Amino acid sequence: MKIKFENIRVGTEQNNLMNLDVKLTPYIGEHNFFCVQDLTEMFHEMVSRSGIQNGSFIAQILHTTCVLSVNELDEPMLLGDISRQLEKHVPKIADYLHNSKLRTANLCEDDYKCDRNADAHIKSFLIGNHTMTLLVRDGKLVLGRWQRVGLVDFDGPRNRDLVVQISGE
């Protein structure tokens, strides 16, 4: 059995939905933090470089305000709907204890923004998926017809670190 590791850094934006389709512009507010980075091709390339034909691909995001997701990332209106529903149920501006003076743990003296991001933590907590496992068959990731792999950041712009492990024969 072979095992390959790789570290990745991905830069995100505050919101990139308008870049995917300009028709989303009226639906994106100034406090909307929802950035989707499609990692599918990068992950395919990593599997190809690994030389592993059959096994497992595991990716883990090392941040608490973003997730990894398998979904239909080529459909901007769906991503707009997901973003709008999350913002509706967990708005950026609300009376969060994490954002208040009550908080005394894990303060970020060098990064004021990280002390005002309770909504991003809640969205990430509700969605989950900080780690994902995909199958590798015949040297390729196994994905369905519309499935793409994305990093969804609820607190950008930031640099995000991921660790990937590919194992198998």
Image: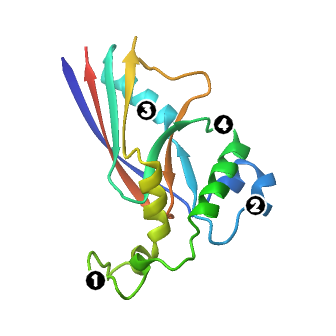
In the image, 14: left or right of 57? right
In this figure, which residue is indicated by the disc labeled 2? 27
Q: Secondary structure at mark 3?
A: helix
Which mark sits nearer the N-terminus, 1 or 3?
A: 3
Spatial CA distance of label 4 from label 2 is 18 Å
Question: Marks 4 and 2: which is nearer the front?
Answer: 2
Question: Marks 4 and 1: which is nearer the front?
Answer: 1
Q: Secondary structure at mark 2?
A: helix
In this figure, which residue is indicated by the disc labeled 3? 43
In this figure, which residue is indicated by the disc labeled 4? 74
Which mark sits nearer the N-terminus, 4 or 2?
A: 2
Kindly indicate the quadrant of the structure image that contains residue 89: bottom right
In this figure, which residue is indicated by the disc labeled 1? 104
From the top left corner, tell me how far across and down residue 154 is, in percent.
51, 60
Circle 3 residues within 10 Å: few <14, some 14–19, many ≥20:
some
Tell me which amino acid carries mark 2: Tyr
Question: Marks 2 and 3: which is nearer the front?
Answer: 2
Tell me which amino acid carries mark 1: Thr
